[in-house]
Amino acid sequence: MENILKIGVVGCGAIGREHIKRVRDKIAGAKIVAVTDVFEGSAQKAAELCGARIEPDAAALINAADVDAVIVTTPGFAHAEPVLQAIAAGKPVFCEKPLATTAADCKRIVDAEVASGKHLVQVGFMRRYDKGYNQVKDLLDSGDFGAPLLVKCTHRAEGVDDSYTTAMAVTDTAIHEIDVLQWLIGDVWASAQVIYPRNTVNAHEGLKDPQLMLLTTKGGIVVALEVFVNCRFGYDINCEVVCEDGVIHMPAPSWPTVRKNGQLSTKIEDNWMRRFIDAYDVEIAQWVDSAKRGVVEGPTAWDGYVAELTADALVAAQTSGKVEPILSGEKPEFYNK
Ligand code: NAP
């Protein structure tokens, strides 16, 4: 592999084009050489952005001799096949979250990667690259605060459209906390429960909103996550870790505090892309760097599988009203290397 990583992109919708622009504008040492999309218009727009050629389908793109590594940004239901094809071709693959939309498909990917003997798959859980989460993790890892006991989080959004379902509060929204919190506190999920408070009048018909999701770890840490996607005031991500010897509250990217009309106020971010823009930049830059070295340093296929199992347990808890177990099994030794 020469020093420029030549990337092929499968799926050229919203986030696919964002990553293409990111590689084009912000990352030295990588370029997009090929793109593909089932919708020709999307492939065309993406190709124009970066001067890449259009391949007829994922298999042709992944197996092209000049494609060193692959980015998969199709909708989640179409992730598994290109990721499996990239593993078969022995090429590093960055797959947007979720790794796949069923735990069985995630497990197929894990098994294929382990059988290949090479670390190839990274999942797009970009919050692990966010400065605030990393500052909290550094403090936790310093040991100065003692063991974490309880984590209180919010994942609030201004509003959602009518296609958003109660289950998507888990699969589209809480999925980020599912991954980042397990990484943050260094423990393994054990059980999931969902409690519905009084419903907001701002939710569309049939949508349960807000929801309180409770996750416990094997070590007994409890996470209380409020998902409230019609909060009306902004995109409001908070995380507070209560430890034996103190409390750590995650900082948000700052806005000026202003004095006007008799009020002292600070803006709340209203856009998820802007809130995590720096995290996406670091994520893709580090993936390019590690793909060149033939390693995976970000969230692995195993992390993607565990996230999907955890999401399944939360979705089951939404309807059962019970505490549901999360049985991820033993992590293969391959992922401890
Ligand atoms: P999107 O705008 O719908 O883009 C997906 C594109 O892939 C569409 O152009 C779609 O074409 C195309 N496509 C569908 N099936 C395909 C296939 N088999 N082969 C090639 N292309 C195919 O979706 P998006 O918002 O970019 O989301 C893409 C993925 O990124 C999702 O998994 C999503 O969860 C993830 N995402 C992650 C974050 C994050 O915070 N990390 C944020 C946003 C999105 P059609 O329109 O014709 O179906």
Image (cartoon, rainbow, N blue to C red):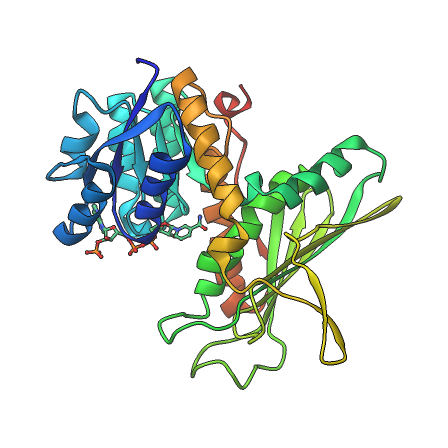
Q: Is residue 206 above or below residue 225?
A: below
Residue sitting farthest toward the front: 260
Q: Which residue is depicted at the point 24% across and 43% down?
A: 49
305 vs 183, left or right, is left
> Residue visible at 78% across and 44% down?
148
When asked about the image quadrant of residue 133, the answer is: top right
Q: Exactly how many numbered labels are in the figure? A: 0
Outermost residue to the right:
245
Q: Is residue 333 above or below residue 97?
A: above
In the rendered view, does 263 fall on the left or right side of 60? Answer: right
Q: Position of residue 329 (x, y in %)?
A: 53, 36
Residue nearest the viewer, comparing 121 with 194: 121
Instruction: Name the spot of residue 265 as percent of width and height, x first.
Output: 71, 70
Picture quadrant where residue 138 is located: top right
Evaluate whether residue 326 shows in this view. Answer: no
Front residue of this view, candidates 53 and 177: 53
Q: Quadrant of the N terminus?
A: top left
Q: Nearer the viewer, residue 292 or 155?
A: 292
Residue closest to the far top: 2
Q: Of residues 57 and 42, which is closer to you in this image?
A: 42
- Horizontal relation, residue 150 to residue 228: left or right: right
Q: Which residue is pictured at 32% across the width and 20% down the height?
A: 4
Residue 101 visible in rendering: yes
In the rendering, at what x and y percent does residue 111 appear?
37, 29
Residue 260 in the image, given as x and y percentages of width and height: 71, 75
Extreme-bottom residue of the structure = 201
In this rendering, position of residue 334 left or right of residue 64: right
